Amino acid sequence: MGTILVCDDSLFQRRILTSIVEKNGHTPLEAANGRECLKIATEEKPDLIFLDLLMPDYDGFAVLKDAREQGLDIPILVITADIQDITRNDCLKLGARAFLNKPVDHDEVKAAIREHLGTQS
């Protein structure tokens, strides 16, 4: 199965997502902020990234922008409580592959993993 990086400044949210990732047979990696996310993504080359948008200091928008500029070819799925269309559109323009709303739904996360990794999780 795949390796999936979960980036969220909330430990609670990371635990929820890593649990879903593990239950579906994948290996989770964790990042507590945007800088850590880019560092891990560059070094570990995960198969997929779940990225929170609103984080202090170095947010998800900065991660999307820098990932694109660095040429990281890793699908990034944004997970956020911000459901505005403008936010969604901005993320997609910056290279996000999908946009999931918080609170996360197990079945939606599972379907997103399957769609973007091409697995039968």
Image (cartoon, rainbow, N blue to C red):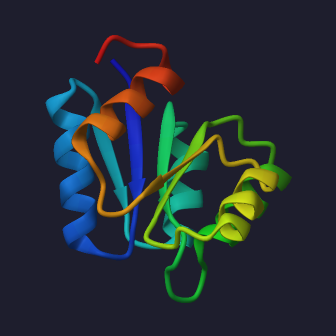
- Rendered residue at 61%/47% (across/down): 42
Q: Quadrant of residue 9?
A: bottom left
Image coords of residue 118 (percent x, y): 48, 14
From the viewer's perspective, tell me whether residue 16 is left or right of residue 77. Answer: left
Q: Relative to residue 38, is residue 112 depicted above or below?
A: above
| Residue 50 percent location from the top left of the image | 46, 50
In the image, residue 65 above or below residue 53: above
Q: Decide if residue 38 is on the left or right side of residue 114.
A: right
- The residue shown at (72%, 53%) is 67
Residue at 67% x, 64% y is 85
Which residue is at the front of the view, 112 or 28? 112
- Residue 55 in the image: state x and y as whole percent: 49, 80
Residue nearest the viewer, comparing 102 with 35? 102
In the displayed structure, does residue 75 sit left or right of residue 106?
A: right
Assign the C terminus to one quadrant of the image.
top left
Rendered position, 59 above or below 36: below
Residue 105 lies, in percent from the top left, at 27, 48
Q: 90 or 10: nearer the eye?
A: 90
Residue at 49% from the left image edge and 22% from the top image edge = 115
